[in-house]
Image (cartoon, grey):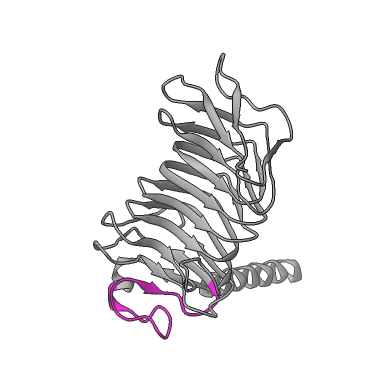
Amino acid sequence: MKQAALAILVLALGAQSAAQAADSDILINQQRAMQGGITPNDAPGFPITLAKGGHYKLVGPLKVPRDVQGMYIPVMADGITIDFNGFEMTGGGTSVGIDSPRDSVGHYSYVSRLDVRNGTIQNFNLGIGFAEQARIENMRLLNNGRNIDVRSGARIVGNITDGGSVNCYLSCLMQGNIVRRGSVLIESGTFIGNTVTTPAGDIALHGGNFAPMGYGNNTIFNENGKDVKIDGGTAGVGPLDPNYCGQHHPCLAVPSSP
């Protein structure tokens, strides 16, 4: 009898813990976006303003009107996790999917610690624009003018992009991504275990001017069978391990700028 009571108590506590975990997620869908109030400063409609740190979870797809941001993270809203939960956010071909403040020269700044995972952002001018310590994992970024534009300390792992560029500045790690019909810029950091295809004549991988980029164990090739080029910028690039740049076509390094 006591054992049965104990089992019931354990199940009840487990259910309570699961409910509390679910309650900690701030849920987002199209209806809630149009109503507003997802955070205290969130007006009805788009963009959805995520004005405080926490865990946000999509429970349905989002369709964003033309010329409007999908989500906006204002100054001081650090420590945000957005779980797309398998859903997609679709734009009208302009603006930014997930946006944050920029400084006077247009660089993303002021906000740190963003996690984005498990879904799709498509048909924006820019998919994700963010400042420091972003982690972008298991996302599909499709048909955006630029897919990712993030600043220092970013970790970009296990994503698929199609069309557009991926830009990461200062101390970045890109690993296990598929970049189709696009290019990659890493101002400094490590590019390892990725697959990149580029259109004819494009440079597949760009280094930067502040610190070298290391790259290794990547498959990089041109869709039309041309030579693949890697531009090291003024800081240069350094192969870490063997890279494959297409049959009979070596990885050609563009000479560093003087």
Q: Is residue 164 above or below residue 27?
A: above
Q: Nearer the viewer, residue 180 or 234?
A: 234
Q: Residue furthest bottom?
A: 40
Q: Is residue 88 left or right of residue 190?
A: left
Residue at 57% from the left image edge and 13% from the top image edge: 248
Q: Position of residue 74 (x, y in %)?
A: 47, 77
Q: Residue furthest top?
A: 248
Q: Position of residue 252 (x, y in %)?
A: 59, 27
Q: Nearer the viewer, residue 110 or 137?
A: 110
Look at the image and tell me whether residue 207 can be seen. yes
Q: Is residue 39 magenta?
A: yes
Q: Quadrant of residue 95?
A: bottom left
Q: Position of residue 163 (x, y in %)?
A: 39, 41
Q: Nearer the viewer, residue 130 or 12?
A: 130
Residue at 52% from the left image edge and 43% from the top image edge: 184
Q: Is residue 214 above or below residue 96?
A: above
Look at the image and tell me whether residue 59 can be seen. no
Q: Is residue 230 magenta?
A: no
Quarter of the rendering occupied by the N terminus: bottom right
Q: Is residue 85 left or right of residue 65?
A: right
Magenta part of the chain: 34-54
Q: Nearer the viewer, residue 119 or 71?
A: 71
Q: Is residue 17 above or below residue 66?
A: below
**Numbered-mark total:** 0
Residue at 73% from the left image edge and 31% from the top image edge: 241
Residue at 72% from the left image edge and 70% from the top image edge: 6
Q: Is residue 127 above or below residue 8?
A: above
- Main SS of the magenta part reads loop
Quarter of the rendering occupied by the C terminus: top right
